[in-house]
Amino acid sequence: FFFLMIRRPPRSTQSRSSAASDVYKRQVHGEVKNLTKKPADDVLLKLYGLYKQATEGDVTTGRPGMFDPKGKAKWDAWNANKGKDKEACKAEYVALAKTLVPPEVAKNL
């Protein structure tokens, strides 16, 4: 799950509500990173695309070339969410994450 981690701006540039959202996001993201069973690749790509759209917005880089199939798959997953609202992507990410974690953890997310 190393590709799900991204850099955030320094905390001083974030608003109070954004900081609270980050705490919640880290909790959900942390649960996804610590899964005992690896989800299917298509599910991982869906999570990646939603996470990137929710945190960075629309993709701004060019599509990787044919010698980077992993990069292309990740770029395609992110680009599939182009134009979606960040909050909608966060909600969709959390809903998908809840299906992957054990029920006792999901009820706390």
Image (cartoon, grey):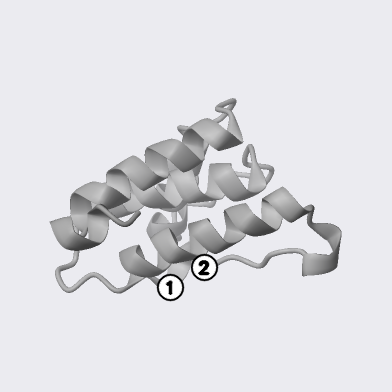
Question: Distance between the Cα atoms at labels 1 and 2?
Answer: 6 Å
Q: Which residue is drawn at 50% across and 31% down?
A: 88
Q: What residue type is labelled 2?
A: Met
Q: Which is nearer the eye, 42 or 89?
A: 89
Q: Which amino acid does label 1 sit on?
A: Phe
Say few, some or many: other residues with alpha carbon within 10 Å of mark 1 (under 14 / 14 to 19 / 20 or more).
Answer: few
Check disc 2 and report the residue beneath it.
Answer: 5
Check disc 1 and report the residue beneath it.
Answer: 2
Q: Which is nearer the eye, 58 or 35?
A: 35
Quick check: can you spot residue 102? no
The image quarter containing residue 91 is top left
Residue 37 point in image, percent of width and height: 14, 69
Q: How many labels does the image show?
A: 2
Image marks 1 and 2: residues in contact by CB distance under 8 Å? yes
Q: Which residue is drawn at 17% across and 74% down?
A: 36
Residue at the top extreme?
83
Residue 10 point in image, percent of width and height: 79, 69
Q: Determine the secondary structure under disc 1.
A: helix
Q: Horizontally, is 32 left or right of 57 in the view? A: left
Q: Determine the secondary structure under disc 2.
A: loop
